[in-house]
Every structure is written in structure tokens, then in C-alpha cells.
Image (tube, rainbow, N blue to C red):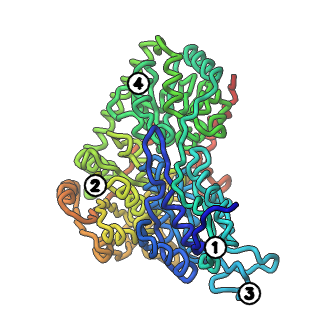
Amino acid sequence: MRGPTRRLTMAQAVVAFLKNQYVERDGSEYPFFAGCFGIFGHGNVSGIGQALQQMPEFRYYQSRNEQAQVHVAIGFAKMKNRLQTFACTSSIGPGATNMLTGAATATINRLPVLLLPGDIFARRNVAPVLQQLESEHSQDISVNDSFKPLSRYWDRINRPDQLVTALPAAMRVLTDPVETGAVTVCLPQDVQTEAYDYPEAFFAKRIWRIPRNRPDRAALQRAAEWIRASKRPLIVAGGGVIYSEATETLCRFAEQTGIPVGETFAGRGSLRYDHPLSMAAVGATGTTAANRLARDADLVIGIGTRYGDFPTASKTAFQDPDVRFININVASFDAAKHSALPLVGDARVTLEELGEGLAGYQVDSAYRSRAEALHAEFQAEIDRVYAIRNQPLPSQGELIGAVNHHGDPDAVMVCAAGSLPGDLDKLWRARHPKQFHLEYGYSCMGYEIPGGLGVKMADPSREVYILVGDGNYLMMNGEIVTSIQEGYKLTIVLMDNDGFKSIGALSRSVGSGGFGTRYVYPRDGVLAGDDADGSVRTLPVDLAANARSLGAHVIEAHGYSEFLSALDAARGIDRTTVIYVRNDRLQGVPDYEGWWDVPVAEVSDMPSVQTARAEWEAMRAHERDYLQGG
């Protein structure tokens, strides 16, 4: 016999369901959704839009760009350790496809976001509707099918009653640490407005409990044996350390065993920068401390990392011919990488149990002393770079140092793409687990400002410094308006070097001289590179004026000393502030024995490309297949 029902439109039922979804871990309970971001068009205004208006307790936030709203949700979810997020809604057509890049960013970074794009009419009789993609081979296709390869769960609600099974399935994926990412539930615009008698039980409060899974006991015992037998073990800490709130556990484990710790982009801050066993970044954008230990390591203990090509330096980082891997990860897919001994489980409890199995074990004192000496040497190198006073324009390294040392020590630094992430990875001193917020799974240009807004919304008590170059700033700056509308103050450090500094440097390294990477007028139909003479004219773009036009307070800093003054002044301003500073395009930071595989043209009539190809082939020979399983 069917129980009590509530008659709602499909869209109203979506909102009523979402507002009663909670998660719990370690006895702490949170509403999973902090609200909904969206832009209304004809494909959702009378459905989801009307439902949000009718239920204001599920807060609606207005965004300026559909891609950006997904980035806000990603930044928020990362700051919340994947325990909370936002839903994001859009109209049919271009509003929906604008979210595709956001969906890819969420899924690649394994961060939960719920996407609710409007869709074509389910009843079809008025097709093709405005913004519908037609196919001569099927009437059951729309642009929203593009989300399928980017989503961890995908569904289309062609009847109102389908919500009863679809939304719990979506929540299962969103709250699963292994499967989480973008979840897309497509909502045909006519079905959004159709009513159905939904079971009252569907809207009851539901708590999704996040488990701390433990690895196999035999695998733990074997891992302890491998560690005891190793001479030069190295930990590579990834994002899983932070998401599982295992940073204190990792610190105790490192101190107990003496094993030094390198970090990935997502794992930066797993160990405080000033801990003597912190080697900081490892790999292509790593430190000499981490990279020298990685080169000689005979055992690598990966914790919560998916081993992207940056921490492995394109598989050149670990050169011991007999190197073996132990991987701690909630996902068996990642735990098995590099022929590893897999410990499939939560990072915190796995480290606790592994530590118990290593009672009394310590690395050789000479090895620990070497690690601590390398740590101290690289801290001195950071001081050297921070102290550079490049003229007439400051270097990127010294500006990073200014923010790191003179900014709020409890703040969060946000970045995503360009040359800044690599320099930050080498130079940033992380004081707490959330201070280094890099979106580098997808390295999505334009993430910085909306992602930073999500960070601020997740923890309004912290200052948020967004470091962004002119190329990224021009991609997606509209959420400055949203930050002002909602009263979330951001400090945006906008470094202008007339183009794409990162790809300019990469272009020079592959022999192409920065071709097509500068913001200059073409000369004789050609966009000049960095090797052009001084007659090349840069564009008359006023980014400071642009930021002012969006409502931000703007401080223009000319040189290093004015930049320091601007940082001090920004802390006293109560709305989003943009510090605009010009920096040197060509002054870089050393590679510190890291390498990244970017193939160079095999044949060319350019001598610079020929030289670069020879250098690439020499490094390519060091790439490894890690097959030393046990």
C-alpha cells in the first residue's frame, strides 16, 4: 500500500530532495548542498527557477557564466574536503554546454558537483525547440549527451517519477570518495513543470555516511616488511591526505619513521613547509630536495595520489632500477599504479595502522640527516629567489615571495594555470593544509577567480589571495561581480606581462621563441614572439580599468615596494580588491632537476628546434616503466 504523497512539479521535487541530503564523517554532520548557482533561461526559468523561488531556504546564487559557477562549486567542495558542494543549473543549449569545461575540471580533480542543465522537450511534438541540436539518426539526443564522458553519473529525466530512482543514485556517486566527480542530471524543460504525486518518504532527511575503509591486513603486513627492508624510502603525499584529514597523522608517521615527504600539487600543505622532513614539491616543478631523494629512492609510498606526469616528472623522477611502490588510496585504480603493492583504504586510518606495524622502525640516521640537509638548502634557495629585485619590472618569484611572507599567514592562495602554478609549487611555503589551493588536475585557465570565490564561501573567516596572470584574468573575471554582490571579499593579485608567460617559456624551450604567446599587434601578418626586436607594439589594454568597471577596488602597484604597500592596504578594504602589477615576462625560476615531457618537432629547418629536439631525445631516454611489483 502506497504511503503519503506530496504533489509537486518535477523541478520542485528536485529542490525539495536536495535540501534534505546530509553527509556524516567521524560524527560530524553537514548539509551536502550549500545551495544552487544558476543562470535562468527559457529552459529552466519556469521549472528549476520557479522551484528555487518557492523554496528560498535552499539558497540561490546568481552567477555571470555557467562555466564559472561550476568552478565556484569545485573550489567550495575542495575547501570542504568533498563533504559539501553546490548544485549548478542552466538553461538548454549554450548555457548547458558552457558547463562542459567545469564538468571536466570536477571529474578530473575528483570533486563533487551536481549539474542540472535544462534539456529539449521530452514530448517532442514542438521540436526542434530553440537551441536544440537535431540528429537525423535519433530523436533521443541533445547537446547534454556531451556530458556523458565527463560525468561520473549521467541521467535524463523524461518522466517526473524517474526522479525517485535517479536522485538517490546521483547522491551515491557524489558522496563516494572513489567515484565522485561531476554528476549530470538533465532536465527537459517541459518535464520540469509537470506535476507528480511523490512519496513523502522521498523528501525525508537522509544522511550519507562517509566510511573510513581499511586495507587488507595481509597487505598492511607486507607493506611494513617492504618499508623495513628499504634503504631510501620516500613518501609522495597527494590530495587524498588532505581530503581524509590525515595531515596530523602523516606528520606523526614521518617523525616516527624518519621517512621524508614530497608532495603533489593537490597534496601541498600535507606537511608544514618548515618541518625538517618536508621536501615540498616533487617532480617536474619540484624542489631539488624532493627530486634528489626521488631519483635515488628504492621505495616510494604514494598516499592519495593519482601519479600525474608532473609529480613523476613524466616518469623520470624515480631512477633506482629496482624502485618499488606502495600506494595508499581509496581507489583501487590508483592504488595499483606503477605495479604497486596496493593498500586500498582511507589515508588516515591506513597510516595509523601502518604506523602500528612499524613500531620501533626508523630510517638510517645518515639518510634522515641527508633529507634534513636538503630541506635546509632549499629553504635558503627560496630565500634567494624571494630576495631578487629584478629591474625595471619585478620577477614573478619575488612577487610570490611578497604574498607568501607579507600576506595573511592564515590565508588561502588560489591559482590554476600558466607559469604561476609551477613557480608556486617550487617556492610557496604552506603553513596549513588549505593554504595552497591549486587546480592542477585540469589546469583550467579562468578557474582562479570563481574558484577563489568558492574557497571564500567555504570559509569566510580566511583571507583569499588569488594569483592570476593577464591571460587567465581575461578568460573569466565576471565572478568579481558575484563576489561583490554576495559580500565575499577577495584579494586578486593580477600580474600583467602582456601575454601567456607560461607557454612563452615553454615555446622558447622547444625552439619556437615564444611564437603566438605575446599580446602584441601583428607585424606583416605575423604575431611576434619573445625573440622579436623592440619595435613590436603591445596592446593598449587597461586591465586595472576593467577590474574597476566590474566593481572591484583597484590598487596599481609600480614595482616591488609599492606592491608590498598594496598588500598591506588591501587587508583594510572590505570588498574585492585587485592589485595590478606589471612583471617581467622572461625572468623565470630554475627547474631544480625536474623535467616535463613536451615532444619537439622531429624535423624542422629551424636550428633552435633541432637543438631542442636533441635535448628532448636525451631526456626521453630516462623515462621508465615501473614494473618492480612484488
Which residue in the protein does label 4 denote? 252
Mark with earlier residue (1, 4): 1
* For discs 1 and 4, the disc positioned in front in the rendered view: 1
- The disc labelled 4 sits on which kind of residue? Arg
Give the image location of residue 561, x and y in percent: 18, 54
For residue 342, above or below residue 205: above
- The disc labelled 1 sits on which kind of residue? Tyr
Mark with earlier residue (3, 4): 3
Query: Foreground: 333 or 382?
Result: 333
Which residue in the protein does label 3 denote? 125
* For discs 2 and 4, the disc positioned in front in the rendered view: 4
The secondary element bearing badge 4 is classed as: helix
The secondary element bearing badge 2 is classed as: loop
Measured in 3D between alpha carbons, the distance from the residue under mark 2 to the one under mark 1, in whole angstroms, is 63 Å
Which residue in the protein does label 1 denote? 196
- The disc labelled 2 sits on which kind of residue? Pro
* For discs 1 and 3, the disc positioned in front in the rendered view: 1
Measured in 3D between alpha carbons, the distance from the residue under mark 3 to the one under mark 2, in whole angstroms, is 63 Å
Q: Which image quarter holds the C terminus?
A: top right
Label at residue 394: 2
Tell me whether circle 2 and circle 1 mark residues in contact (CB < 8 Å).
no
Mark with earlier residue (2, 1): 1
Q: Viewed as shown, does residue 135 lie left or right of 484?
A: right
The secondary element bearing badge 1 is classed as: strand
Measured in 3D between alpha carbons, the distance from the residue under mark 1 to the one under mark 3, in whole angstroms, is 21 Å
Q: Viewed as shown, does residue 251 lie left or right of 123?
A: left
